[in-house]
Image (tube, rainbow, N blue to C red):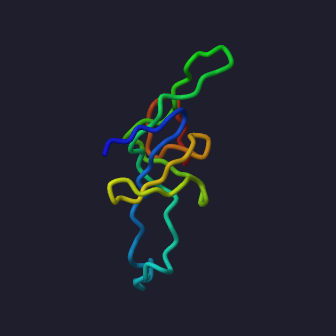
Amino acid sequence: MKFRPLHDRVVIRRAESDLKSKGGIIIPDTAKEKPQEGDVIAVGPGTRNEGGTLIPLDVKAGDTILFGKWSGTEVSIDGEALLIMKEADIMGIVGKTDAASQKIA
């Protein structure tokens, strides 16, 4: 199935969490905390301002992002667990190196 989000919504595939802790202890699925990082799969066209001009989103398909712990709505598309959230729920893009982004040392 092909899915296209509307307006300022973004479809995200959550990053895989580690199976072991730093100390080497295997963590069962029920005790794992869901990662707050993921890859953008699809984005909507953007929002419209009061004048009707389309404002495109800052994220694009392929970006790796950070989002809030309780952000988004979990859905299943073609048997795959994905998240759909508004762009405002995204905290930032990981690893973007253009001149507009700032590095945190």
Based on the displayed image, in which of its 4 quarters is residue 73 positioned? bottom right
Which residue is depicted at the point 37% across and 53% down? 77
Which residue is depicted at the point 59% across and 54% down? 71
Q: Is residue 21 left or right of residue 78?
A: right
The extreme bottom residue here reads: 25
Which residue is depicted at the point 49% across and 75% down? 32
Rendered view: 76 above or below 24: above
Circle count = 0
Question: Viewer-proximal residue, 52 or 41?
Answer: 52
Query: Where's residue 86, x and y in %?
Result: 57, 42
Query: Where's residue 30, x and y in %?
Result: 48, 80
Which residue is depicted at the point 55% across and 37% down? 102
The extreme front residue here reads: 1
Query: Where's residue 83, x and y in %?
Result: 48, 53
The extreme right residue here reads: 50
Q: Is residue 99 left or right of residue 20?
A: right
Question: Viewer-proximal residue, 53 or 97?
Answer: 53
Rendered view: 101 above or below 22: above
